[in-house]
Amino acid sequence: MMAQRELPPPIFRHDPADIADLENQIGGWEDRSKLPELGLKKVVVGPDAILKLPAALEGLSPEAPGDVVLVVDRTPMRRGGEDLKPMVRVLLEREGFEVCVVELEGDERGVVHPDFREVETVKGSIRPGVPVVALGSGVITDIAKHACFTYEQEHPDEPPVPLAVCQTANSAPAFASGMAVISKDGVKRTWPSRLPHMLVADVEVLREAPLEYTLSGIGDMSAGFVSFGDWHLGDRVSGGGYLEASWRILEDVRNLMIPYAGEIGDRSPLGMEVLAKVLALGGLSMTFAKETSPLSGYEHVVSHMLDMGAERFGRPVASHGLQVGVATIAASISWDYLLGNLDPEAVDVDACYPSFEEMEERVRETFDETDPSGAMAEECWGDYRQKLQGWYEARPRFEALLENWDDQKARLRELVLKPEAVVGALAAAGHPLLFEELNVPVPEEEARWAFQNAHLMRKRFSSGDLLFYTGLFDEALTGSVFSRMRELAKGTRERRE
């Protein structure tokens, strides 16, 4: 195995654990007026972070110590051999808090789903001025955030609900995001929500989380290696609201996640601290944008397609973050192809605008195979129709993009990481490199289907759309993407032996 060199302590330019300095930096940015207020007031990261929760709560609520609502599920969690949830309850009670535990029961298997039923359960326990502590996963966090948010919407005359989030895994950027993924009518949707006032990331707790959760966080954050290219491209073509501040605050992700990938994959204390902080920065990046675009490009749509195809192909759904990580490799390869092969002089602009009839038939044919009821196709066509309409209306912007392609290509190369670097970082972290290596293996045929058709399901413009409209996205390209994935995985692993 390749020997790891000793790394110096990481230096964060935008350290979420120093909120005062972070707010000071943000205050000097020229686009500060475009950003929401930073509701996150305290971030505690370290080996004993959870032990500082009672004191931190006293600074969060003027009535503390008093009542506190502790939101948990039934998933067993440990810290240093202790049962985590009773430990936190006792910790709070010893400091004089009266703890009201809200335990979400979940489905018949005990799995808690982020839906409005669970949101209402938590909201029913909220009282004015009483802090809420979410102790658990991104799902528990989203439920608690949205319960507080909707309570505040319904009680505008009351002060904001003091909310602390104690993340129990480095699994997603949801912990520091002002949005929440909540299902409605069985469909996951991202809703405007709110940030917690305080985030607690205890390194010992994070190290004891299942490895799959840590790898999922790595995969989810790796999207930032390519997703800004999609966001910038969408902005150039259709005015997608690209925000430089969201790119700027993720500078540490690009500078630290790659060199510390081995530490992160080993789940060393240093690695867990780095990953916790970059996940927090990821959440803030999306909060600034008021949408998921900073960390959700074509790679995420491929993951959604894999989810949608799971039932069609008769397999369980794989981990979202792991899917995103592997899809990021595929997306980086297709980006590399786009930037190396799009010749604006050879583009027949008229041919870049397929008819609505042609595309409706294509969308329905693709998704009717997955859902014979037609409901999925109807929803996807509704989104795609909006994208296609916007594509027609943005023709002058597309022509301007082609006229200035050299400048745009240079900027996109800054925003998109080369495939070799993406694979190298994920390999160093021990993350899967191929779809068949996921926790639920996905055969290449299914992954190809998802990759080639993902542009048909979303209204947001991405690199997949530009490849398709310019005639570059065909089965040959898909085949070359998957061949290169295998070559890069093999070569990278051989060099690491």
Image (cartoon, grey):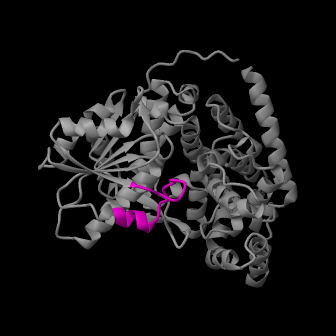
Q: Quadrant of the N terminus?
A: top right
Q: Is residue 115 magenta?
A: yes
Q: Locate residue 290 relative to residue 452 in the image: left or right.
A: left
Compared to residue 18, the image places residue 293 above or below, namely below
User: Which residue is the extreme one toward the right?
Assistant: 476
Read off the magenta span: 104-121
Q: Is residue 18 at least partly visible in the picture?
A: no
Residue 157 x, y percent position in the rendering = 17, 70
Q: Quadrant of the C terminus?
A: top right
Name the residue nearer the viewer: 120 or 300: 120
Residue at the location (47% across, 19% down)? 8
Residue 343 x, y percent position in the rendering = 78, 57
Name the residue nearer the viewer: 492 or 110: 110
Residue 20 x, y percent position in the rendering = 25, 40
Q: Locate residue 272 relative to residue 469 in the image: left or right.
A: left
Residue at the location (29% across, 48% down)? 27
Compared to residue 335, the image places residue 254 above or below, namely above
